[in-house]
Amino acid sequence: MSKGLVVVAMSGGVDSAVAAALLRQDGYDVYGVTMKLWCYQREAPTAKACCSMAAIGEARATAVVLGIEHAVVDLEEQFEAHVIGPFAEDYREGRTPNPCVNCNTFIKFGTLLEKARRLGAGWVATGHYALMEHGAGGPVLKRGIDASKDQSYALWGLNRKRLDKVLMPLGALTKSEVREMARALKLPVADKPESMDICFVEGGHYADFLVNRLGAFAQAEPGPMVDQAGQVVGQHQGVMRYTVGQRKGLGLARPEPTFVVGIDAATNTLTVGEESDLYRSAFHAGRANFVSIDVPTSPIQVDIRVRHRGRAVPGTVTPEGFGRLRIELSEPERAITPGQSAVFYDGEVLVGGALIETAIG
Amino acid sequence: MFGEYLDHNAAAPLRPEVLGALMLAMEQQQANPGSAHGAGRFWRRRIDAARREVAGLVGAQPHEIVLTGSGTEACFLALHGVIEAARTRSVEPPLVLATPIEHAAIREPLCAMAARGTIRLLLCPVGASGRVDADWFADHLTQIPVLVVCQWANNETGVIQPVLEVADLCRAHETRLLVDAVQWAGRGPIDLTAQPIDLLVLSSPKLGGPTGAGALFIREGLALEPYLVAGKQEGGLRGGTENSLGWIGFGAAAAAARETWAAEVAHEAPLTARLVEQVLARVPGARLAGDGSTRIANTAQFLVPHDDEEMLILALDRLGYAVSAGSACAAGAHERSHVLRAMGLLEPGFASVRVSIGSGTTARAIDDFVTALCTGIQAARPDEAEVAR
């Protein structure tokens, strides 16, 4: 007796392949969907880009081995609108975006969920390392068991009303367990190398990507580099090439280690300083979303991560209305970067998150 | 295994006669039809026989038929052959007249040539009827085009085009006419002894033959510039070892279609009428593309209220019905119909569903399909979270 139909987002990688296999073993009817998001018709079909023809072929080959249905679904328009467009805009405005957040929020658990329902599927599943629990008290999203792979940081944008339609079968596994399973199942992608780059940017060269896409723009041109006092100390190659906390590539010969501490896109100015200048304990964030609780109306105490793989620091989140938050940490964090996410936890439970706007003080 | 097959315009099931001919042929010693020895001559004779059958279906002489690897290849051979020959005679880019609802095999090469400046391309208008107006061609033939292109029946809507009127006009203006008859062959009569068409394209799988085979009729006396210059196969117009099995199967399909097409039309026409009647009655807001125009007997394309055409087709597949929205691209991903766009029928909130039936389709299957269509449309009702967003 089948548990029902589930759509698995299959990228052609090993994680989503094992997720599909586990759901099948668990008694679901599994329908693999590979989203055609971006590159293959514009760039050479290299194996690296996750939406290349090669990746579509690998997903299809995996589906054959697993004996599941598989289809390619065209989401290029949505990906452009919700991921690529905002990604480019963020760099133009001096922020450092994490495009996976928008992809999860709007594509995988937005459009794909809507598409799955039109197929008659009750769930969408992914190969994320996060624990999606469906207990009697309702669905709860937690960090993945494998701390080195935990992907909950990029999942804070999920719509709470739809968590009951989301499955993440890898949350209780480690990466090496997943690899072992893939080999045991003789999946064609069992030993495929990990993709760490942004899927639509070839080889991690995001600056080239932006210049190709946007043509000439002010934030890609050289400009002044100033110290905390406003004194010009050098020249930079365009603010979009830098991120807060960066040390390498500044081309400065100063006795003390020097870091990017601020980006002003409007004037194409980079502010540099010492490591101690990077530490901040309060900031504003926007576009807040809450996954485990109703939108709070008074301050809440949570653990807060300000970067992927970062530690969680206790702090206070104070709602200021219209999705805007004031966040105070119990101890300063290094390089709080506009455009990255501030993600809130209650122990292992993902509470919510927001986009970092500006540091305070 | 794949459920009810209602996508005959994409590729029809292999006819039993074709399967028989292929099984017999596959048991023979394979050889190159170009070889001088007996084994080679055996395959040469079989290809000759297939060519006669294909010619017989359309009233052509066997030497007027070039066998190809697909209908698309036949289209390209014709387009390239006429246009390149004309370019050697003229400095100006030659003019081509065509309809905007041609299959990608015609449309894409023509658009690419026009974009490169190799040709000047004029497309006729087409309204919601889906039928082009022969008068437009009469008006524009005075500009002395080197080629006129007009399909016989549209692959999506099934609407029959005024090909014979256009053919008479072209003859009167001494202009070459290329006709894509891929969806018409086997669904209506073709007699090239009487019909003044210079170039005509056929496709094997649409006739119940194997995929990977097609043909181009080239009227005697017309010289084309080949694009695949290699060996002297197919009169020097298509270099490369012959697709013997594909063409033998194609020949068997053409022979069978010549015998049975009228009976097939008689079987399909009332079933398609039943389908149209039921969809319009049971699906609120549904409409028939090309309503009011004469269509081939097996085809009906609908616009139904649904916000995601691609998922509707996949949902119907899961419910056990193989249909399509229009045409699919190589990756198996989705593009919306250029035919419906040209007809002004691509409205947001409406999905296209093309149903093309065959001799094996039953009334029961039609009724059950319409029920599945209603189920698929129901699933597109937005849920609470979607409304909230």
Image (tube, rainbow, N blue to C red):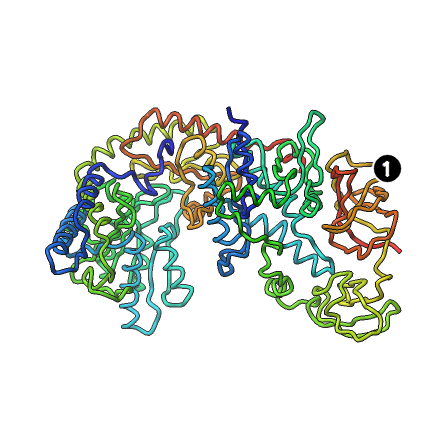
The residue that label 1 is drawn on is A298
Using the image, determine if residue A48 lies above or below residue B85. Answer: above
Residue at position x 37%, y 44% from top?
A: B130
Q: Secondary structure at mark 1?
A: loop
Quarter holding the N terminus of chain B? Answer: top left
In which quadrant of the rendered view does residue B14 lie?
top left
**Hey, which residue is sitting farthest left in the picture?**
B38
The foreground one among A173 and A240 is A173
The foreground one among A110 and A101 is A101
Q: How many marks?
A: 1
Q: Position of residue A106 (x, y in %)?
A: 63, 44
Residue at position x 34%, y 39% from top?
A: B293
The foreground one among B295 and B106 is B106
User: What chain does badge 1 belong to?
Assistant: A
Residue at position x 69%, y 71% from top?
A: A221
Using the image, determine if residue B147 lies above or below residue A309. Answer: below
In which quadrant of the rendered view does residue A7 lie?
top right
Q: Residues within 10 Å of mark 1 (few under 14, many from 20)?
A: few
Q: Position of residue B192 (x, y in %)?
A: 18, 50
Query: From the viewer's perspective, is B60 left or right of B293?
Result: left
In which quadrant of the rendered view does residue B63 lie?
bottom left
The amino acid type of the residue labelled 1 equals Ser
Q: Position of residue B346 (x, y in %)?
A: 48, 44
Using the image, determine if residue A360 lies above or below residue A144. Answer: below
Q: Position of residue B229 (x, y in %)?
A: 26, 66
Using the image, determine if residue B150 lies above or below residue B173. Answer: above
Quarter holding the C terminus of chain B? Answer: top right
